[in-house]
Amino acid sequence: MRKIFGYLRYDTYQELAIMNDLYRNELRLYKNLFQSVMKFQSKERIGGRVKRKYEVAKTPYQRLIASNQIPEEVIEELRRTYLSPNPTELKSSTGAKIAELYQAYKEKKGAQHVDPHSFRFIFQLE
């Protein structure tokens, strides 16, 4: 959560609504459908060093489809979900919502100075 929203204190209902909207929509789709993850496979000690091995990076969507543990109807629904969003648009709308959250924080604080280092942007804002 801190990687996305930074270290500011969000404690109003407006900020909560923005965060929930982001989690339920763009961020959930982007992370599960398009952001690949390397899954840990094994580790081996060689002398004083530990060598870690990872599987090939795949998205959670790809791992779920490859698992063969879900019915065909669910797979088809997931494929439709996968084909509908554009990853670039998801990322830019995520950045816009994070900027909206930051603006709500600044309005809450009024004229007080907000430390820009307490808020990390992982998405490029326009």
Image (spheres, rainbow, N blue to C red):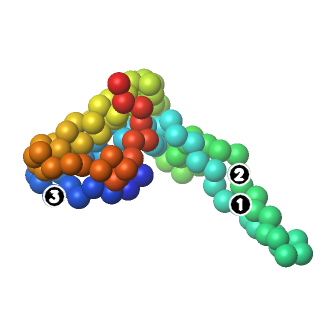
Q: Residue at x 38, y 56 (%)?
A: 2
Residue 11 - label:
3
- Nearest the eye: 29 or 78: 29
Q: Secondary structure at mark 1?
A: strand
Residue 41 - label:
1
Q: Secondary structure at mark 2?
A: loop
Q: Is residue 126 above or below residue 42?
A: above
Q: Earlier in the sequence, mark 1 or mark 3?
A: 3
Q: Earlier in the sequence, mark 2 or mark 1?
A: 1
Could you tell me which quadrant the N terminus lies in? bottom left
Q: How many dots with numbers?
A: 3
Task: State the residue position of label 2.
Answer: 55
- Local crowd size for mark 2, using a 10 Å CA cut-off: few (<14), some (14–19), many (≥20): few
Q: Residue at x 42, y 32 (%)?
A: 124
Report whether 43 appears left or right of 13: right
**Callout 1, which amino acid?**
Gln
Q: Secondary structure at mark 3?
A: loop
Q: Is residue 126 above or below residue 63?
A: above
**Horizontal and vertical percent for residue 75?**
48, 37
Contact? badges 2 and 1 (CB < 8 Å): yes
**Horizontal and vertical percent for residue 90?**
38, 30
**Callout 3, which amino acid?**
Asp
> How much space separates mark 2 and mark 3, taking CA atoms?
40 Å
**Taking the image as drawn, is residue 24 in sight?**
no
Q: Nearer the viewer, mark 2 or mark 3?
A: 3
Contact? badges 1 and 3 (CB < 8 Å): no
> How much space separates mark 1 and mark 3, taking CA atoms?
40 Å
Q: Residue furthest bottom?
A: 48
- Nearest the eye: 42 or 117: 117
Q: Earlier in the sequence, mark 2 or mark 3?
A: 3
